[in-house]
Amino acid sequence: MVSEQFDAFLLDLDGVVYLGDEALPEAVESVNRLDERDKELRFLTNDPRPQRQTVANNLRKLGIDAEEDEIITSGWATAHYLSQQDVTTAAVVGSEGLEIELQEEGIEVTDDDPNAMVVGADEKTSYQDIQRAARHIHRGATFVGTNPDGSFPTPDGPAPGAGAIVRAVEAAAGTEPTVVGKPEPLMFEMALDGLADDVQAVVIGDNPATDVLGAHRAGLTGILVAEDEPTAASARDLQQPDLTISTLANLFTDTTDTWEAPPYSWPDEIRPGVAAVVVNDADEVLLLKRADKEQWALPTGTVERCEPVGDAITREVEEETGLQIAVERLMGVYSYPEQQVFSYPSGKAVHFVTSCFRCTIEGGTPEADEEEALEVGFFDMNDLPSDILPMQPQWIADANDTDGSPAIR
């Protein structure tokens, strides 16, 4: 049974334990059964409005003996994150509860040149709040969003969530925020803080895009509370739950496979990429030493809007190496995430679907542009540099495949 498979249970609140002011069927009894079995309980909510103590009091009114330190709200998590970043002042778009959580972490709430601009939401959020936030960000305040939820469930249907306000400020400021709440791993890491390193933890939520995806990104098993099994976009979709249950009572009857994290990050976006195997008259291949990784690589790049892939690769090669090339043929399409998901220092991860072409030289002199390439040179295909990007020797081998069929990898 799930109740025996795990030591710690990270429970979403809205849509899992209660809806509005009413406990969901069998939720209170199930949580108390876990408590009686000495399971570690943590209650997570992306609602940034209330203080943790308020949430704990509400759970006690429902019959769950919850303590403040068992509650992880996106508002408290944001305040705790900022205090760890040595932020001392912040402006706020959001509730009084969010402001109090910041103050209790030693952060002054002020509109006088704040270090950070924290964007949550409450029912009183206005156009003027969005304008104020955008102006602080424009003046240099770090943009932090409590959570990305565009809406949250109520008995009367969905209501606008903090994510709706965060995206409005993002559009006005032209700057992407750091987001603390689910599905970012940070809230889950805070929930597990203080527990033993070998604790087996599971996340239980009602939203595949925040609870399940967040669990998997944090390396945890994710269980969905829903009437119907969701349909995944693909077999590798991290939003697909490990188990779907109708109520928390199923924790005492069902079992689940534990999550095994893949060797790549969940990408924030997918981009079309291009690469070139440029061969000279001596049958040597053109490589450049990339400035970002300081490793040798084929010329590569991204397809811009409305740009054909052939135009994209000829443009990229000329920009990076000074050579004019002609595309000879498509020699492979590469998309396996183990090789084609790249994480950047900003924290963003991108999944590239790269079309690779065999190309010939039409003119120009090879010269590194110094911004993207430190060096440029031709290499014997059987004697490539040892510090070449690991997947690209296969691409070069595919370019020499005599049957002419493009590789799909």
Image (cartoon, helix red, strand yellow):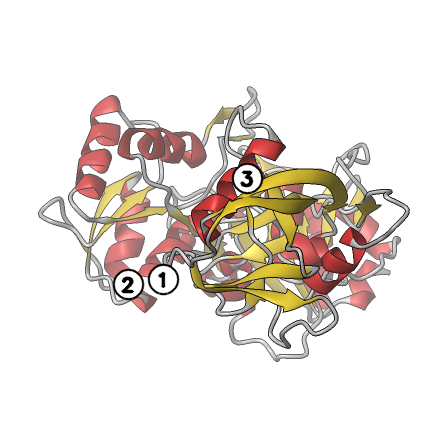
Query: Crowdedness of circle 1 by 10 Å Cα count: few (<14), some, many (20+)?
Result: some
Q: Amino acid at mark 1?
A: His
Task: Give the answer, above or below, for where 320 lies relative to 157.
Answer: below
Q: Position of residue 372 (x, y in %)?
A: 42, 56
Q: How far apart are labels 3 and 2 at the CA level?
A: 54 Å
Give the percent coordinates (x, y) of residue 100: 27, 52
The answer to the question of whether label 2 and label 1 lie on touching residues, with beta carbons closer than 8 A, is yes
281 or 388, nearer to the observer: 281
Direction front: furthest residue = 281
- Name the N-terminal-most of marks 2 and 1: 1
Does residue 212 show up? Answer: yes
| Residue that badge 1 annotates | 80
Where is residue 117 shown, x and y percent of the image?
A: 25, 46
Q: Which residue is mark 2?
A: 105
Q: Amino acid at mark 2?
A: Glu
Residue carrying label 3: 314
Q: Secondary structure at mark 3?
A: helix
Q: Is residue 18 above or below residue 193?
A: above
Mark 2 residue element: loop
Ranked by sequence position, the earlier of labels 1 and 3 is 1
Locate residue 80 relative to residue 111 in the image: left or right: right
Q: At 82% across and 47% down in the image, what residue appears?
A: 407
Name which residue type carries label 3: Thr
Q: Can the viewer see residue 221?
A: no
Residue depth check, mark 1 versus mark 3: number of the one nearer the observer: 3
Circle 3 packing at 10 Å, graded few (<14), some (14-19), many (20+), is: many
User: What is the CA distance from the residue labelled 1 to the residue labelled 3?
Assistant: 49 Å
Locate the N terminus by quadrant: bottom right
Q: Would you identify the image quadrant in which residue 48 lies?
A: top left
From the top left corner, tell me how far across and down residue 327 is, in percent.
65, 38
The nearer-to-camera label among 3 and 2 is 3
